[in-house]
Image (cartoon, rainbow, N blue to C red):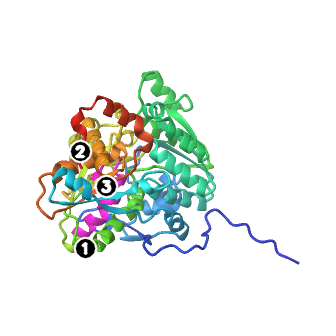
Amino acid sequence: MTTAPVAARSTDPLGIEVPSTVPTHWYNLAADLPEPTPPHLHPGTKEPLGPADLAPLFPMALIEQEVTTERYVEIPQTVREIYALWRPSPLIRAHRLERALGSRARIYYKYEGVSPAGSHKPNTAVAQAYYNAVEGVTRLTTETGAGQWGASLSLACALLGMTCEVWQVRSSYDAKPYRRFQMETYGSVCHSSPSELTEAGRAMLAADPDTTGSLGMAISEAVEVAAKDPGAHYSLGSVLNHVMLHQSVIGQEVLVQLEEAGERQADVVFGCAGGGSNLAGLTFPLIGQNLREGTTTRVVACEPAACPSLTQGEYRYDHGDVAGLTPLLKMHTLGKDFVPPAIHAGGLRYHGMAPMVSHALNLGLLSAVAVEQDDAFRAGVQFARAEGIIPAPESTHAVAAAMDHARTAPEGEVIVIGLSGNGVLDLPAYGSYVRRAPASTAVPT
């Protein structure tokens, strides 16, 4: 009698060799913090959340990662195989930008735009889809702002045999149709938010039919749909601790790559900050090194002036969404009902900041600046004309702050910029800026 071969699952490793340069573990800053991050609270009881409270929305592996204090968490082989499609991402010396600015510093940028989706978001999308697929979940729901997260989770679901339903903030949905086309190409469905498809969406539209939407609104819709479907889970692209954990591959690579470049350490690192995932991924491993080894890397979070949660928000417990369906998170917040202007950097239009990032700021482990949109685009254009890469609008906030600093930086200072994604699908926003920008925007090289 012949036994039929067991069908391979999409979560099974392919058995391909993964380069040693691809990280084997995620790094968890919680292990090195001098004080623990305040716990998430149940919205009803106001008591710390337990695993049972999160089980309707997340697989147990992610729930465990949300609360773990282990310094390192092993990356599953299947996830490493997928990471190897683009990891490690390059750390590039910005020689032409240095010359254009007349800077005496050494400027590097960590370029996450090499991922298939064009941003850093697949670092956690692949991990989240994997753990859900292992648990037997076949459908994920999520929100997205600019569309980078929605595209990344759609990519991950396609690779791991799942489907994805995305609610995209209305202003970005209307302005960036190519993000939607990207999601649909990967096999996902994308709705404008707020929509008529959910109770939360209908209530928001009734209150303001002309609303431009917000990430808080889109989260409410995605959470509502997942909570009502026993075969679905919700997936979040930023804010939560397990997302910060997955993104740490960025900063771990930076530490290795700086050493390979002959640098003792980064003196100052600039990362854009909206919900916090890019900033944490880039900087938490470096902050951990500061805490453990006494290095002195300075971290600067660069947020939009139109949505300044770190520089103007209150540090308190708040909901992560407008409808109040999510747990209460201790974070820097502008209030769950805050609806930011329809800025081009849609990925930064969030009322709050990741609890771990907020806690790090509160402990003095990083600082924050707010950048005006025109200043950000001006820097993005200058960077493109010097280095050739058009940064994502989100990334331009870090570029702008770094360029301002680099012009007067001392000789030999090492500056690292987090280039969280490329702006190839954001060209209409660039076009709008360039057509009205003064000729002085150009940078001689």
Dot 3: within a 10 Å radius of its alpha carbon, few (fewer than 14), some, or many (20 or more) residues? many
Highlighted range, magenta: 271-290
Mark 1 to mark 3 CA distance (whole Å): 19 Å
Residue 434 falls inside the magenta stretch: no
Q: Nearer the viewer, residue 411 or 254?
A: 411
3D distance between C-alphas at marks 1 and 2: 29 Å
Say which residue label 1 marks.
262
First in residue order: circle 1 vs circle 3: 1
Residue indicated by mark 2 = 443
165 on left or right of 63: right
Q: Residue at x 41, y 56 (%)?
A: 243
| Left or right for 230, reference 168 | right
Query: Could you tell me how many numbered marks the image carries?
Result: 3
Amino acid on which the number 3 mark rests in the picture: Gly
Q: Is residue 287 magenta?
A: yes
Q: Position of residue 374 (x, y in %)?
A: 26, 35
Q: Which residue is under mark 3?
A: 418
Q: Secondary structure at mark 3?
A: strand
**Local SS, label 1:** loop
